[in-house]
Image: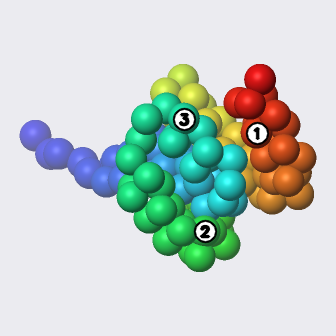
């Protein structure tokens, strides 16, 4: 019996990594809205203050997410028909990445809406 190592890197793992990197890019892109929501949910403000790290490296997280999502898509399509788990993780990563690229353009509007909503 000969064992083959066809699936050394599962494509769902790489797409999951792209989803995590996309989420970190989203956290970095939302410098004001996410911290306000986290403080309202009871997360310690010391932890929220540490989110500035993600804002400094937001571009790197976005490029990393783009690379991992592209690599996982290539890997999955090269190996055959990707499964449902792969597509779920891939779509989650793509949505987080898209939101992280769009969110900085609407940050001030979201922040003013959120503060008005919290005051009411």
Q: Quadrant of residue 56?
A: bottom right
Please report whichever mark, 3 or 1, sits nearer to the chain's N-terminal start. 3
Cα–Cα gap, marks 3 and 1: 11 Å
Is label 2 or label 1 in front?
1
Residue picked out by circle 3? 40
Please tell me whether mark 3 sits on a helix, a strand or a loop.
helix
Question: Residue shown at 15%/45% (left/top)?
Answer: 2
Q: Is 112 on the left or on the right of 48, as rendered? A: right
Question: Residue shown at 64%/52% (left/top)?
Answer: 26
Q: Quick one: which residue is furthest to the left in this view?
A: 1
Q: Position of residue 47 (x, y in %)?
A: 39, 55
Please report whichever mark, 3 or 2, sits nearer to the chain's N-terminal start. 3
Q: Position of residue 69 (x, y in %)?
A: 61, 53
Q: Is residue 90 above or below residue 51?
A: above
Please report whichever mark, 2 or 1, sits nearer to the chain's N-terminal start. 2
Q: Quadrant of the N terminus?
A: top left
Can residue 14 be seen from the camera position used here? no
Question: Residue shown at 58%/49% (left/top)?
Answer: 35
Disc 3: CA contacts within 10 A as few (<14), some (14-19) or many (>=20):
few
The label shown at residue 55 is 2
Q: Quadrant of the C terminus?
A: top right
Q: Position of residue 83 (x, y in %)?
A: 52, 27
């Amino acid at each position: 019996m000969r064992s083959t190592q066809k699936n050394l890197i599962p494509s769902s793992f790489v797409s999951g990594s792209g989803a995590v990197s996309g989420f970190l890019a989203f956290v970095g892109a939302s410098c004001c809205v996410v911290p306000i929501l986290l403080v309202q949910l009871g997360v310690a403000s010391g932890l929220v203050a540490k989110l500035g790290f993600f804002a400094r490296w937001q571009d790197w997280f976005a490029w990393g997410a783009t690379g991992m999502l592209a690599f996982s898509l290539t890997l999955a399509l090269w190996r055959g028909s990707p499964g449902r788990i792969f597509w779920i993780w891939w779509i989650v990563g793509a949505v987080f990445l898209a939101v992280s690229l769009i969110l900085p353009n609407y940050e001030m509007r979201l922040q003013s809406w959120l503060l008005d909503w919290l005051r009411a």
